[in-house]
């Protein structure tokens, strides 16, 4: 294989020096200081080389014969010898004459070069007769060392998994970057980017690829912004379902609640979208989810409460009926009243109504029995309804069951309710996995993660509870096959203890320097590389992984696949099945 790319014999370079660079900034969150190593390379100028180096590239700095230290190019600057002494002190006419001379002599002059700043990947490449291999190496090369440009084939061998799943194309190489998607799920992942960077598009693509590659996986998305009902509509029709705190069970309400990207409207008409939403709602109505948890009361607790509250000698017949009821019906004192059979529940309601005749309507015991009677009646009513509301605890139990769909989207537009529901769901999920030993693999996706794990918390708005729950999921979930992906634009406002549990992450444009330095500090990322994210366009990402790529913790720039194109293609296939 071709190890190096000499750019048609025009690439010549040497290492001038390697130094430490310190970057700092201060925001309302405090001061952050990050230091990193950067190498300065001197590359002979040619138009072809200059054009190539403007795309992401990797270089090999010679250490000794057949051994090279791998660096990633961060930035470049073309230089001409005449530029060195030119400043404002030189008269304008002379400066313009010098600049004209500089412009016309770039290619021909021997006094032109390109300063290239490159960052160490901390890997060494050894070239053998028939193969190349990469190992970790933290050493520093000697100034003056020869520098070579890695070929397309070497970059593919360096980064891509042979049997992996494509997460995008490597910018500068037009190569598919293949990763171990199972490792990305198992060790948690984050996507960080400003509004419009394509976070929901990226996550939707990765979710569908995860479902496709792992048939045992179940995914539950907590969606505050209302983006995944559209981005994953084809998957919802095929093997998914939705829960919401809102009643969105008609096409108009559903579409009003969800974000429809402008780019998607160019690919599919609104009328077609209405048709596919109708197909989904006709087959799987959006179920209601509530933050309310039903009261827990056992038959033994009910008997003890009534015995203590009723006056001596009052309602003894009814009390005895409850005791006999428990035995005759085959229940125990630990049986929850909500778990009674329909006929038995009706009989217990009758006993309570009889007891209520013996006490004052203004008494607490009367109100308690009335509430319990109404609650038992409501259970009977709810069971007759196809679309009954579920609480987060029941939802967790359902997701782990055999009859649940593989994809569940929970749309909760109110952040406070979203935190309450997600927290209770995660706590119950972990509890059930710990106590029942469920081997079902579950991936929890938290969009707008700054709402769930903010750096400043309060018990009043459930941010304290959700913070603890998500951190527990990130710290403990892996051994119970419970995993987590996060997506956010407000990185500086996140709980950094939680963020540091992520082993793979995608970074797009983050306008604030503070946010970029948080990324660099949290994941030991070189600041010169993170600065290149400011140049990224929608759908382009800096991707780094400690677990999912062939070499660990090597940042690469990719163009993510377009989830919308896959969505439209899959929706049109549904026409043939309906």
Image: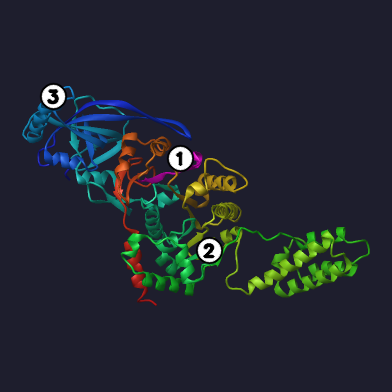
User: Going 38% across and 37% down the picture, which residue do you hit?
Assistant: 513
Q: Is residue 318 visible?
A: yes
Quadrant where the N terminus sits is top left
**Residue 496 part of the magenta segment:** yes
Marks 2 and 1, how far apart at CA:
30 Å
Give the mark, 3 or 2, whose residue is nearer the N terminus: 3
Which of pointers 3 and 1 indicates the residue nearer the eye?
A: 3
Q: Secondary structure at mark 3?
A: loop
Q: Which residues are magenta?
A: 493-508
Q: Position of residue 30 (x, y in %)?
A: 47, 32
Which of pointers 3 and 2 indicates the residue nearer the eye?
A: 3
Q: Which mark is residue 243?
A: 2
Q: CB under 8 Å between callouts 3 and 2?
A: no
Q: Which residue is mark 3?
A: 91
Give the mark, 2 or 1, whose residue is nearer the N terminus: 2
In the rendered image of this protein, does residue 284 appear above or below residue 461? below
Q: Is residue 500 visible?
A: no
In the rendered image of this protein, does residue 562 appear above or below residue 277? above
Q: Which residue is mark 1?
A: 492
Corner quadrant of residue 459: top right
User: Going 91% across and 65% down the picture, which residue do you hit?
Assistant: 314
**Residue 206 part of the magenta segment:** no
């Amino acid at each position: 294989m071709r190890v190096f790319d000499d750019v048609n014999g025009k690439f010549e370079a040497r290492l001038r020096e390697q130094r430490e660079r310190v970057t700092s900034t201060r925001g309302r969150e405090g001061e952050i200081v990050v230091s990193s190593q950067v190498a300065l390379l001197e590359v002979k100028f040619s138009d072809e080389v200059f054009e190539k180096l403007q795309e992401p590239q990797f270089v090999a700095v010679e250490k000794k014969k057949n051994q090279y230290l791998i660096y990633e190019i961060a930035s470049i600057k073309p230089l001409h010898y005449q530029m060195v002494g030119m400043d404002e002190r030189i008269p304008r006419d002379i400066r313009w004459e010098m600049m004209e001379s500089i412009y016309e002599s770039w290619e021909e002059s021997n006094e032109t070069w390109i300063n290239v700043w490159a960052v160490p990947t901390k890997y060494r490449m050894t070239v053998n007769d028939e193969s190349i291999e990469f190992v970790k190496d933290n050493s520093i090369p000697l100034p003056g060392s020869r520098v070579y440009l890695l070929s397309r084939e070497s970059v593919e061998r360096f980064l891509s998994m042979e049997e992996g799943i494509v997460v995008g194309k490597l910018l500068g190489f037009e190569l598919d970057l293949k990763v171990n998607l199972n490792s990305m799920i198992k060790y948690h992942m984050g996507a960080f980017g400003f509004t419009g960077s394509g976070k929901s598009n990226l996550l939707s693509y990765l979710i569908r690829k995860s479902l496709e590659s792992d048939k045992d996986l179940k995914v539950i998305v907590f969606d505050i912004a209302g983006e995944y009902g559209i981005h994953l509509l084809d998957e919802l029709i095929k093997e998914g379902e939705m829960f919401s705190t809102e009643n969105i069970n008609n096409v108009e309400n559903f579409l009003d609640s969800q974000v429809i990207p402008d780019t998607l409207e160019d690919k599919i008409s609104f009328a077609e979208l209405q048709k596919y939403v109708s197909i989904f709602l006709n087959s799987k109505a959006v179920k209601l989810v509530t933050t309310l948890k039903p009261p827990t009361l056992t038959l033994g607790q009910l008997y003890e409460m009534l015995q203590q509250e009723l006056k001596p000698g009052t309602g003894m017949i009814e009390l005895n009926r409850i005791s006999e009821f428990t035995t005759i019906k085959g229940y125990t004192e630990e049986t929850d009243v909500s778990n009674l059979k329909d006929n038995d529940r009706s009989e217990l309601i009758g006993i309570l109504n009889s007891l209520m005749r013996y006490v004052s309507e203004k008494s607490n015991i009367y109100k308690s029995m009335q509430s319990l009677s109404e609650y038992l009646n409501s259970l009977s009513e709810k069971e007759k309804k196809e679309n009954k509301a579920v609480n987060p605890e029941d939802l967790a139990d359902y997701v782990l069951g055999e009859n649940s769909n593989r994809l569940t989207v929970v749309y909760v537009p109110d952040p406070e309710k979203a935190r309450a529901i997600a927290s209770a769901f995660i706590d119950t999920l972990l509890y059930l996995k710990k106590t029942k030993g469920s081997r079902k693999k579950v991936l929890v996706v938290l969009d707008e993660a700054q709402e769930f794990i903010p750096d400043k918390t309060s018990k009043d708005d459930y941010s304290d509870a959700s913070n603890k729950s998500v951190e527990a999921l990130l710290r403990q979930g892996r051994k119970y096959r419970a995993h987590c992906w996060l997506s956010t634009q407000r990185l500086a406002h996140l709980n950094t203890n939680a963020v540091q549990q992520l082993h793979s992450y995608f970074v797009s444009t983050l306008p604030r320097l503070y946010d970029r330095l948080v990324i660099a500090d949290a994941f030991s990322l070189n600041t010169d590389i993170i600065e290149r994210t400011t140049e990224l366009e929608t759908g382009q990402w800096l991707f780094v992984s400690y677990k999912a790529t062939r070499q660990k913790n090597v940042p690469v720039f990719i163009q993510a696949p377009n989830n919308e194109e896959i969505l439209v293609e899959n929706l049109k296939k549904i026409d043939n099945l309906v």
